Amino acid sequence: MTIKVAIACDHGGVELKAYLKENLQEPAIEWLDLGTDTTESVDYPDYGYKLADAVASGQAEYGIAICGSGIGISIACNRNDKVRAAVCTNTTMAELTRIDNNANIVCLGARLTGDLLAKNIVETFLTTKFEFGGRHERRVNKLSN
């Protein structure tokens, strides 16, 4: 089964974005690359907004957002009320944000996270399912109101 994943970054995340697109094998991914492709300075909010819009509109099931720390682009993504973007620095965070928060965008800090760890975080994020029903679903629904 192939899933559609949008990916976007600022100038600080170009190399990590390229690495992830080339090296992620599971699950099978159809990429929607929203840029940037240059190391020339750009503004992370522009790319966070584009990514959030793509996920919120259903153009992609999930998103991967990358900037230097992952924090700035996560703030931009979370301006969209249909998005739950989470900065993850390890696989446990990636697993829990899917299980507990039904996050639909994972945010990475290219200056803080190595390539292999980032790959493992994204694989965990994309293969972990949300636990529908009960307290988690009730809480997630409150985030969208």
Image (spheres, rainbow, N blue to C red):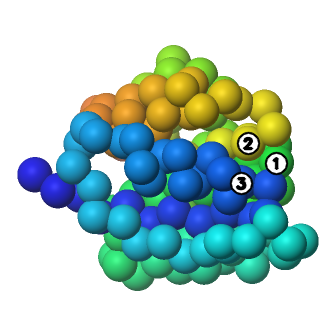
- Give the amino acid type for the residue marked by disc 3 in the picture: Gly
Asked whether the residues under the numbered discs 1 and 3 touch, taking CB atoms below 8 Å apart as contact, a structural biologist would say yes
Asked whether the residues under the numbered discs 2 and 3 touch, taking CB atoms below 8 Å apart as contact, a structural biologist would say yes
Residue 41, visible in the rendered structure: yes
The quarter in which the C terminus is drawn is: bottom right
Image height check: is 78 above or below 46? above
Q: Percent position (x, y) of residue 99?
A: 38, 31
121 relative to 80 in the view: left or right: left
Q: Disc 1 designates what residue? A: 68
Of the image marks 1 and 3, the number of the one nearer the N terminus = 3
- Give the amino acid type for the residue marked by disc 1 in the picture: Gly
45 relative to 133 in the view: left or right: right
Residue 9 lies in what quarter of the image?
bottom right
- Distance CA(mark 1)–CA(mark 3): 6 Å
Of the image marks 1 and 2, the number of the one nearer the N terminus = 1
Q: Disc 2 designates what residue? A: 110
- Give the amino acid type for the residue marked by disc 2 in the picture: Ala
- In-front residue for pair 49/11: 11
Image height check: is 7 above or below 124? below
Number of marks in picture? 3
Q: In the image, which disc is placed on residue 13? A: 3
- Distance CA(mark 1)–CA(mark 2): 5 Å
Image height check: is 96 above or below 21? above
Residue at 51% x, 63% y is 7
Asked whether the residues under the numbered discs 1 and 2 touch, taking CB atoms below 8 Å apart as contact, a structural biologist would say yes
Residue at 26% x, 38% y is 26
Q: Percent position (x, y) of residue 115?
A: 60, 32
- Distance CA(mark 2)–CA(mark 3): 5 Å
Q: Secondary structure at mark 3?
A: helix
